[in-house]
Amino acid sequence: MPKRIVVGLVANDAFNGIPTRNPFNFPNAGVKKLEISINGETMTTRPYEPDFADNLYPRSYLSLYQGLGKLGDDWAPNVTLGEYKNGYTLWCIDFTKDQEAQLDKFHLIQTGNLRIELQFAQNTVETLICVVYAEFDNLLEINKQREVSIDY
């Protein structure tokens, strides 16, 4: 299982390289619910339920900072609330027990099934790709016989 993921949506033609489209534009697409579960358990206290039409999405916006471990830090992504809604809509979820995936320490490796459920307020106007960036802790071991073993 990943220790942290970042989830966003991008237009299919932008993802596939149409030169007139920006593949780094992550529209909110009218998402009304995002639920992430591992082995059937929701990983956040409750699903994200933004309402982009009525500007009720601060919890989703803060997930970007909390998931990166940068909430209240001097360095943080330079994304305003308005920018988040209009092209920077990304959710970052930290799955580590101590919520410190950003630190240089090893977290226990877990296995399981990850599920991402998205619901939209209305039908989408274009085909979207759900892009998931996932971070993993992995091991590479070299024993005294110089044999290399890896866990992935």
Image: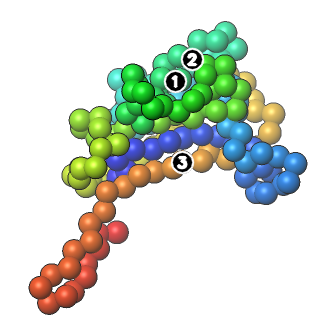
> Tag on residue 135?
none
- According to the picture, the residue beneath numbered tag 3 turns out to be 132
Q: How far apart are marks 3 and 1 (CA)?
A: 16 Å
Q: Earlier in the sequence, mark 3 or mark 1?
A: 1
Q: Earlier in the sequence, mark 2 or mark 3?
A: 2
Q: Distance between the residues labelled 2 and 3?
A: 20 Å
Is there a contact, CB below 8 Å, between mark 2 and mark 3? no
Residue toward you, 124 or 134: 134
Question: Residue sitting at 22 percent across and 74 percent down?
Answer: 141
Question: On the rendered structure, is 136 left or right of 107?
Answer: right
Indicate the position of residue 48 as horizontal and vertical percent values: 49, 24
- According to the picture, the residue beneath numbered tag 2 turns out to be 57
For the residue marked with disc 1, what is the amino acid? Ser
For the residue marked with disc 3, what is the amino acid? Val
Indicate the position of residue 54 as horizontal and vertical percent values: 67, 9
Instruction: Give the crowd class for mark 1: few <14, some 14-19, many >=20 residues within 10 Å.
Output: many
Question: Residue sitting at 19 percent across and 88 percent down?
Answer: 146
Residue 67 in view (yes/no): no
Question: On the rendered structure, is 29 left or right of 96?
Answer: right
Instruction: Give the crowd class for mark 3: few <14, some 14-19, many >=20 residues within 10 Å.
Output: some
Query: Based on the displayed image, in which of its 4 quarters is residue 127 positioned?
Result: top right
- According to the picture, the residue beneath numbered tag 1 turns out to be 60
